[in-house]
Amino acid sequence: MRMYLGFTCVLLTLACLAVTQQPTGSEKSSPDKQAVPGSASARLKETLESNVKTEWDAFKKKDKQSYSNLLADDFVAVEDDGQGMRNKSAAAVEVDRSVVSNYFLFALKVIPLEANAALVTYELTLQFPPKAQVRFKRVLVSEVWLKRNGQWKELYYQETRTR
């Protein structure tokens, strides 16, 4: 429980830092300076959105290798099932047991925290096979991504179930 609270505090701190780093409307910069960060921000969002889709496609296709390739070696996940935190290897094993037949992403946002770190948030609806006990599951997801050795790797995943 103490580790869970610690990771939650870290995630909230990173989010708060991101918000405090956003420029205010009163700050002025030249149009040239705004064009580069805007395009870099768009590329970052495109890259991380693609990674998130690859992540959920891997669960859908039971492709453990594709999923594992996205995760940092020190990856940690906290899911809504009450089973506690998972490391990279435990999370990868879940791909084999996946019964996700489809997924729907909504409201994906990428918040750059620094040049090599970003917070990604989104709403996800998972669809399960017709004979499954539960047909749909809706969660809010927060992920921390880090750029290591030129590649974006997921460091932290947390989901909260919604109705």
Image (cartoon, helix red, strand yellow):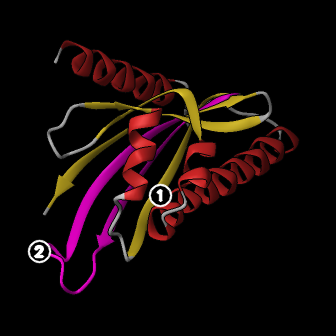
- Work out whether residue 76 or residue 6 is closer to the camera in this orientation and state it: 76
Asked whether residue 18 is in view, the answer is yes
Which residue is tagged 2? 133
Magenta region, residue range: 116-144
Magenta stretch containing residue 140, yes or no? yes
Which residue is tagged 1? 108
Q: Choose the circle earlier in sequence order: 1 or 2.
A: 1
Is 50 placed above or below 100 here?
Answer: above
The residue lying at 70 percent from left, 54 percent from top is 42
Q: Residues within 10 Å of mark 2 (few under 14, many from 20)?
A: few
The residue lying at 67 percent from left, 39 percent from top is 152
Left or right: 133 as drawn, with respect to 119: left
- SS assignment at label 1: strand
Left or right: 90 as drawn, with respect to 48: left
The residue lying at 42 percent from left, 29 percent from top is 15
Residue 161 numbered mark, or none: none
Is 112 placed above or below 97 here?
Answer: above
Magenta stretch containing residue 127, yes or no? yes
Q: Amino acid at mark 1?
A: Leu
Is 144 placed above or below 122 here?
Answer: above
Asked whether residue 156 is in view, the answer is no
Q: Position of residue 22 (x, y in %)?
A: 55, 31
Mark pair 1, 2: CA separation: 28 Å
- Work out whether residue 60 or residue 78 is closer to the camera in this orientation and state it: 60
Give the main secondary structure of the magenta stretch.
Answer: strand
- Work out whether residue 20 or residue 98 is closer to the camera in this orientation and state it: 98
Residue 145, quarter of picture? top right
- Work out whether residue 133 or residue 17 is closer to the camera in this orientation and state it: 133
